[in-house]
Image: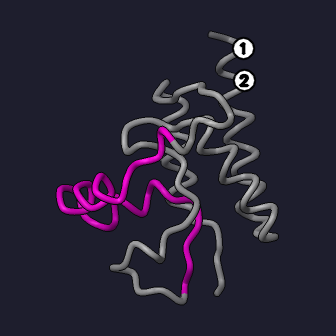
Amino acid sequence: MTVKLNQRAFNHAQDLIVAGKYVIDDRDAWSEHQPSAQQENDFIEQHGIGEYAKWHLGIDDQEDEERKGRYKFPYGDFEKVHRCGLLAAESRAGQRKYFDIELAVAHLHGMLEAFRRTA
């Protein structure tokens, strides 16, 4: 499996943060805030797999582009970036040694912290 940074998702997350579309939540809240499989399926049905992909910072290039399994490291709820989602993605990327994803998530987390301090 080769997982690499989804640059389009990274750009989307940055845009959302700049637009104020983020949630500063607790580190361990991702299990509660992460979209369910049914919410994911509903989102894909309404918006398509391309929009779904923008909510995942990793791409497994060995998986079919039309399959959910291609997209890794979710960071939001299809409306807002969640701090807890970024922290979960950063931790998992570090464990799996996906350094490009880990660095990208660290940058996004830093953006959130900077905006939080100025708010």
Q: Which residues are magenta?
A: 32-61
Q: Residue at x 73, y 62 (%)?
A: 93
The alpha-carbon separation of the residues under discs 1 and 2 comes to: 5 Å
* Of the pair 37 and 54, the residue shown nearer to us: 37
The foreground one among 105 and 32 is 32
Q: What percent of the width, then of the height, locates residue 50?
A: 34, 66
The 10 Å Cα crowd at callout 1, few under 14, some 14 to 19, many 20 or more, is few
When asked about the image quadrant of residue 111, the answer is top right
Q: Please provide percent x and percent y for residue 63.
A: 48, 86
- Position of residue 77 measured from the top left corner of the image (x, y, whole percent): 42, 43
Magenta stretch: includes residue 29: no
Quarter of the image where one finds residue 57? bottom right
Percent coordinates x, y for residue 31 in the rendering: 54, 45
Please state which amino acid type lies under the numbered disc 1: Arg
Q: Is residue 60 magenta?
A: yes
| Kind of residue indicated by mark 2 | Ala
Above/below status of 66 relative to 47? below
Residue occupied by mark 2: 114
Quadrant containing the C terminus is top right
Task: Point out which mark residue 117 bears.
Answer: 1
Marks 1 & 2, CB-CB < 8 Å contact: yes
**Majority secondary structure in the magenta region:** helix
